[in-house]
Amino acid sequence: MILSVEVAQAVPSAWRTLPSGLEERTIRVQLKNGRVLLGPGADKAGPARAGVAEIRQERWSSRVDWDVPSFWSHRDPRTGEKYLVFSSVPASVEQAFLQPLAVWELSEEPGLLQDVELVLASRALGPEAQEAQVLEVASRGGMHSGFFARYASAVALLARTSNRKSLLAWIGRLGDGALSERAKSELLRSVHSALTREQRPAPDALRALAAACLSTVAASQPEEASLTPRLESVVQVYLPWLAGSSPEWKTLARDALSPAERTKAAATLRWLAGLARFPEPQRDLLRQLAAALG
């Protein structure tokens, strides 16, 4: 079940200590504007749903540092916040909110709700129509989420039509500015994850990953502020994997960039290779790639 919902009010009780040393409290959450996107009632027209959910939170006293395996024990629902809720409970909005598999704050990801609706609607399309849809949506402008990035990468890697070249080129350019920073990271992670599961990754898919990695490097300045989680993943995960997966990895990387981008990327790679925070094998890899770029 997937639903969107807004917290109209969240009222917590006081914490109380149990004999076990566990502390607990309840939060009375008034929900409004509930809308089922996937699951029972998803196709029914009508007013948005509202209800009340009583969330139970638990924590150990300060003397104990054990984790509590309860989703809502690790975050507080906030008044006015809008959520996208994934739940295995195909019941009411309140029950799904109480027992989520995952909850995403809609304010954290631009375009998330629209992207989820788009992907759900695409289930009725054939593969070629899905490919065309991704290209059309990606070209519209506006910001898209990590959810869309995951979907687009899966469609691109499965594509077997003339759309494949355009889709992989879009991945190599990291979405042409249509993806949030989180979505760019998700695009890289999704493509890499899919390729690691293949015995013989397709050369064009490897080229797309190399292009996305080098696009990240070329867009980064040789300074501490540029060491984003995405750039660190490129250095520590994706480039080493490419080097071990393709004997032509340096050529793939070089061909992915324009001459001007190669110059910028080489400067950043040399700077990264001088940082003691990275192991020597990774630094040597960066030096080799910088030399290949010229």
Image (cartoon, helix red, strand yellow):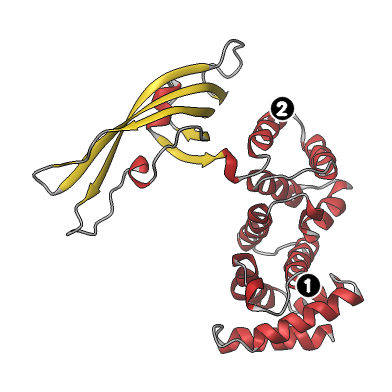
- Identify which residue is drawn at 58% across, 45% down: 108
Q: Are marks 2 and 1 in contact (CB under 8 Å)?
A: no
Horizontal side, residue 10 vs residue 206: left or right? left
Tell me the element at label 1: helix
Write down the quadrant of residue 19 in the picture: top left
Residue 112 on image: x %, y %: 64, 39
Horizontal side, residue 90 vs residue 268: left or right? left
- Identify which residue is drawn at 77% across, 49% down: 178
Total marks in image: 2
- Pointer 2 or 1: first along the chain: 2
User: What kind of residue is marked 1?
Assistant: Ala
Above or below residue 113? Residue 266 is below
Tell me the element at label 2: helix
Horizontal side, residue 81 vs residue 274: left or right? left
Q: Which mark is residue 124?
A: 2
How far separated are the C-alphas under marks 2 and 1? 39 Å
Q: Which residue is mark 1?
A: 218
Q: Which mark is residue 288?
A: none
